[in-house]
Image (cartoon, rainbow, N blue to C red):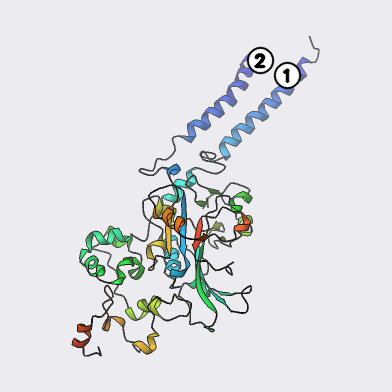
């Protein structure tokens, strides 16, 4: 047929090798799950989801600390999740015996929310701590889980009604 | 001889393609969570925010955010009566330690928590040259840090300034909407600790989620609606001066 058939075959072999090399390289370089959901590595979704948590969530706390739940129900702090003040405690929830939360300094923790600031909503209870307590820890008078001081408690403590 | 070589040339690409599928294996199954059954967003009730910084601290702890960088932060707006178009915005250390007393108590003062808006048509994922950032099938914008080159295109593309380059890994980082928590049935760290309920995670595909009732009965807005990003962080009671 062609007198130069051999040249064509050689060219075809070179092209075929190039195609194979491309396909093999691509398979080796492109992550296996690329394109599983879209133009990205699908496994990254599960990898992100696999991170460990730091905050246990209030449901985990309430499973054991039912006494505090009852106390909180009587006051306005019922809506405040435990870890808002006590900090991240997923490790305590996993192993309550060996990891115990530190005692909080109410003079610092309460002021984070309740220190007066004109940008805060008007209905939100705010005090200037320097005038209100003079740096005294808030839990001297208030019970943080049920912060409102009832009138009879005030009289008992010798405070004004 | 010729025939064997030709057969080999035909077989090799076929084998390579087949091998790819063998390597891919079965996708990782996460129990009780189906990607396509969720579409995550967030609700921010500005009149409830007290600027305590709990969300910023919780986010930093949950996600190991380096100091001086923020996946979420709080801005304090001061809008003078005579200067509505030029609000004063400050965010000392992202509001992590709360805010000092206002210098000027006149006019309008309020807090605005900010985070990634998890846009449906996110500008940041569109500019990524390698596919290292993407919108998941459940509507969360994530970064694949093992694939990110650190080219910073996405940092520039985000109209909300929600991205940064992590100085340790030199890869792009942003709010993941606590993807490791929401896929386990928990809420995000910021929503968990918010003492006033100013931040609420919402699943827009779940008809029982209270976010639907809220969106129906309130006038909500998203940040920079003119950018048409399809932002899914909805702000209630947002002043027109908020940028």
Name the chain under label 2.
Answer: B
State the residue at coordinates (44%, 60%): B63
Identify residue for label 1: A9
B19 is higher (above) or lower (below) than B104? above
Camera-side residue of A54 and A37: A37
Nearer-the-camera pick, A61 or A11: A61
Q: Is residue B4 left or right of residue A139?
A: right
Label 1 is found on which chain of the structure? Answer: A
Q: Secondary structure at mark 2?
A: helix
Whether residue B192 sits left or right of residue A96 in the image: it is right
Q: Name above or below for residue B69 compared with residue A34.
A: below
**Mark 2 closeness class: few <14, some 14–19, many ≥20 residues within 10 Å:** few
Q: Is any part of residue B59 visible from this angle?
A: yes
Packing grade of label 1 (10 A; few <14, some 14-19, many >=20) is few
Same chain letter for marks 1 and 2: no
Q: Nearer the viewer, residue A51 or B40?
A: B40
Report the side of A80 relative to B160 (left or right): left
Q: Which residue is mark 2?
A: B2
**Residues at marks 1 and 2 touching, judged by CB atoms closer than 8 Å:** yes
The numbered dot on residue A139 is: none
**Foreground label between 1 and 2:** 1
- Considering the image in quadrants, where does the C terminus of chain A appear? bottom left
Identified at 60% across, 74% down, the residue is: B87
User: Can you tell which quarter of the image residue A135 is in?
Assistant: bottom left
Q: CA distance from mark 1 to mark 2?
A: 10 Å
Pick the quarter of the image with the N terminus of chain A: top right
């Amino acid at each position: 047929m062609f007198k130069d058939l051999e040249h064509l075959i050689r060219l075809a072999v070179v092209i075929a090798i190039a195609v194979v090399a491309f396909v093999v390289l691509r398979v080796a370089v492109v992550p296996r799950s690329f394109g599983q959901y879209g133009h990205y590595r699908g496994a990254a979704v599960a990898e992100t989801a696999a991170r460990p948590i730091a905050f246990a969530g209030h449901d985990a706390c309430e499973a054991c600390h039912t006494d505090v739940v009852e106390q909180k129900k009587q006051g306005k702090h019922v809506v405040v999740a435990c870890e808002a003040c006590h900090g991240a405690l997923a490790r305590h929830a996993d192993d309550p015996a060996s990891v115990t939360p530190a005692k909080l300094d109410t003079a610092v923790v309460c002021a984070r929310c309740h220190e007066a600031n004109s940008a805060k909503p008007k209905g939100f209870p705010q005090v200037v701590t320097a005038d209100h307590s003079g740096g005294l820890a808030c839990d001297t008078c208030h019970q943080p889980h049920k912060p409102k001081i009832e009138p009879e408690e005030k009289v008992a403590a010798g405070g004004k009604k | 001889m010729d025939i064997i070589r030709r057969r080999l040339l035909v077989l090799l690409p076929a084998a390579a393609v087949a091998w790819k599928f063998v390597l891919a294996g079965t996708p990782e199954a996460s129990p009780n969570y189906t990607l396509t059954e969720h579409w995550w967003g967030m609700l921010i009730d500005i009149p409830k925010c007290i600027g305590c910084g709990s969300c910023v601290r919780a986010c930093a702890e949950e996600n190991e955010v380096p100091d001086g960088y923020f996946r979420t932060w709080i801005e304090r707006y001061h809008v003078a009566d005579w200067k509505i178009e030029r609000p004063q915005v400050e965010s000392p250390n992202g509001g992590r330690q709360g805010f000092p007393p206002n210098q000027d108590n006149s006019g309008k003062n309020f807090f605005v928590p900010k985070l990634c808006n998890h846009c449906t048509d996110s500008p940041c994922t569109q500019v990524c040259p390698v596919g290292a950032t993407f919108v998941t099938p459940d509507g969360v914008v994530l970064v694949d840090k093992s694939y990110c080159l650190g080219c910073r295109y996405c940092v520039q593309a985000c109209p909300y300034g929600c991205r940064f380059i992590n100085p340790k890994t030199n890869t792009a980082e942003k709010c993941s909407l606590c993807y490791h928590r929401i896929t386990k049935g928990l809420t995000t760290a910021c929503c968990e600790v918010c003492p006033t309920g100013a931040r609420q995670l919402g699943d827009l595909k779940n008809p029982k989620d209270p976010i639907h009732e809220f969106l129906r009965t309130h006038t909500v807005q998203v940040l920079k609606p003119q950018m048409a990003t399809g932002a899914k962080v909805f702000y209630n009671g947002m002043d027109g001066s908020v940028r």
